[in-house]
Image: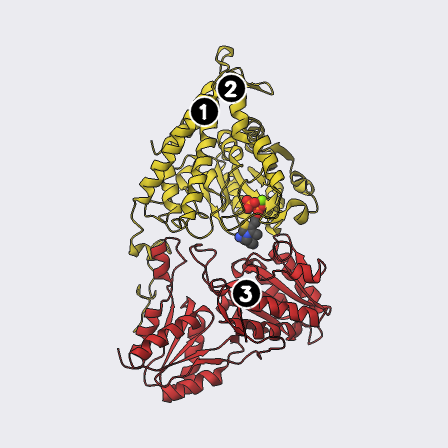
Amino acid sequence: MNKITYREALNQAMAEEMTRDDRVFLMGEEVAEYNGAYKVSQGLLDKFGPKRVIDTPITELGFAGLGVGASMTGLRPVVEFMTWNFAILALDQIVNAAAKMKYMSGGQYSCPMVFRGAGGSAARVGAQHSQSLENWIANVPGLKVVMPSNPADAKGLLKASIRDNDTVIFIENEINYGDVGPVPEGEYIIPLGKADIKRVGTDVTIVAHSRMTGFALEAAKILAEQGIEAEVVDPRTIRPLDEDTIVASVVKTNCAVVVEEGWRFAGIGAEISARIMERAFDDLDAPVIRVTGKDVPMPYAANLELMALPSVADIVEAARVACGRA
Amino acid sequence: MANRLAARFKGRHDSQQYFLVGVAMSAEQKSGITHEGDFYSEEALHEMHDSMLFIRRFEEKAGQLYGLKKIGGFCHLCNGQEAVCVGLNSAADAKDYMMTSYRDHGHILARGTDPTAVMAELLGRAGGVVKGKGGSMHMFDIEKNFAGGNGIVGEQVPIGLGFGFSSWYKEDGRVTICIMGDGGINQGAVYESFNMAALWKLPIVFLVENNQYAMGTSLDRASAETQLYKRGISFKIPGIKIDGMDVLEFDKRMREAIEHARSGKGPMLVEANTYRYRGHSMSDPATYRTRAEVDEWRSGRDPIARLQNQMIAAGLSTEEAFKQKDKDIKKEVAAIAKAAEAQPEPGASELWTDIYSDPIEGAYPETGKVY
Ligand SMILES: Cc1ncc(C[n+]2csc(CCOP(=O)(O)OP(=O)(O)O)c2C)c(N)n1
Ligand SMILES: [Mg+2]
């Protein structure tokens, strides 16, 4: 299997889908001539021309709405936000239009499209450019939320998202763009709503998505050295959430840690631990522990930034507490 | 010494008319350099020159420190745009409000903020203008009426509208100078702001720093109307275009715009024609433009060289004197960087301050742990 970067895997997915279906087009800031602010769309302008790979002005609300309208009339837009921080300007179109169009129109119209871009914390870019907003969006019925943690998932999930008949919010991770991993060539589709067990274990379940999956795997290595076998579950799709896979793991290990980079308040970890409580209460030997970003805006100073983010050591400690081996 | 620029500008702001010779000084004091009938004192010209040069050398130092990984994240330099920063601050009053985007080092320096605090902020130190919490993109100085340092493109425009509204409400005689880029002007909220500002005749000067590019997108690839000063026409906002590479021209015309806003006639839209010499941020190789284009602006229109030539021609200085001045400023900037670097990082408890006015009940424990 070819080893390519997360960024190249996303690029491959778009190129393949654009070749397969000429209704698919890519639009966003710097996606064409600059080849993408993070080079995810490298070469797509050359391959598909300026009609299908389109540079926009800096007008997030406007081009998000353009995508909604285009999807309602049969096109398959992939709208790139340079980062999800800027998608906040477009939330009206995403939340009030795309998510609800099918419902409001009694099923007459739908918005089969992908909003994608980098989310999560980046490095040293401060409060406005470093945040995880997936819980905001995952709260909205009508949207699907996808967050790949490695190159293969990035490809398989993006292809599935572009083919999906609903609006998919596809949140990439800026720090993962350069990660290298094996990625199947050609037709490789990962169905939305399916979690993946990234490491099998018996002692404690660690649920982690996006960049935190890597952190959880690191933690699992350290735990293994200490004689604790952690099972790492990557939901991959936040909504719909693969509750069955998570619950099955907890039934096996009897304890769980949920990790997320974002804020704790009403976060993804809150949702997942509530579901574990609802479905596996009797199987739990201890309360579910959440490891999250600190409840503060992201600071710039290097030392403070490090403190604000969850660490591998935090996960190790939480896992030991959860399984009663602290 | 560290606060040299601040002292310089303080003097100027204290007596607004002291260097526009045409207004306040006698004919004998005239420097000999005229600009459309206005005369500048020798001292004022030196101040403008030194300030621009200071900003340039400061930015170069920031670039260097970024290369050494001492500054992190996004870092947007304003080399080439110094005349806008300096001309603007010589035209504005100290009491006037100002806000801009992430390309904010030059503006806050020209505003008179302590350069060591600005450098310390870039380095993420405790003595930074915002205690190391903001970094390059988020410079604020409430004492200088400088309200950021805003990282989201266009974000500061409706905020500037609010500052202008506040002055209208309080009748405090202040003008808000709300700065945006040629890319930022395309955001929808800008037009909502234009309409309200004109509707209520708010004392605001919307200043577009047209440096010809928004990241890799040239003006003509993003704007249907590339004469950006006309963007206010349908809101009845008068617009002017100024050569942003000529500090004297910029100062003079900006004064007129600010006066217009201060006199109760409502907002104005000013387009400053300028150029950024460096990439958009430190990670941008700027391959979207030709070397020849950059050279044309750099060697043909550089604002610092232009003023130097004017001053030499008027017998106010010499090439040697300017060379010496440059050496001095470089030394000063190096000392500032050293002093800033010597500062400690912010204390760990700073992570939890400045979020609410008072600590809120039920907040998560500072460790973030509940077990
Ligand atoms: C809402 C939003 N969208 C996108 C970005 C990413 N971005 C940062 S700067 C920039 C270009 C802005 O160009 P311009 O307004 O001309 O200002 P300049 O950088 O030239 O000073 C873009 C697209 C952002 N920060 N905010
Ligand atoms: Mg610009």
| Spatial separation of the CA atoms under disc 2 and disc 3 | 54 Å
What is the C-alpha distance between the residues marked 1 and 2? 9 Å
Q: Quadrant of the C terminus of chain A?
A: bottom left
Q: Which mark is residue A7?
A: 3
Q: Which of the pair B87/B170 is nearer the observer?
A: B87
Location of mark 2 (residue):
B312
Residue B23, compared with residue A232, is above or below; it is above
Q: Position of residue B40 (x, y in %)?
A: 51, 20
Q: Local crowd at mark 2 within 10 Å, few (<14), some, or many (≥20)?
A: some
Residue A208 is at least partly visible in this image:
yes
Identify the residue at image location x=38%, y=36%.
B333
Q: Which chain is yellow?
A: B
Residue B29 point in image, percent of width and height: 48, 13
The residue at 56%/69% (across/down) is A9
Report helix, strand or loop for mark 1: helix
Labels 1 & 2 near each other (Cβ < 8 A): yes
Q: Is residue B19 left or right of residue A320?
A: right
Quadrant (top left, top right, bottom left, bottom right) of the N terminus of chain A: bottom right
Disc 1 or 2, which lies upstream in sequence? 2
Q: Which residue is mark 1?
A: B322
Query: Marks 3 and 1, how far apart in space?
Result: 49 Å
State if disc 3 and disc 2 touch (CB < 8 Å): no
Secondary structure at badge 2 equals: helix
| Residue type, mark 1 in image | Phe
Q: In the rendering, at what x and y percent does residue B60 appear?
A: 45, 39
Tell me where residue A295 sits by quadrant: bottom left
On screen, A27 above or below B80? below
Q: Residues within 10 Å of mark 3 (few under 14, many from 20)?
A: many
Q: Nearer the viewer, residue B204 or A316?
A: A316
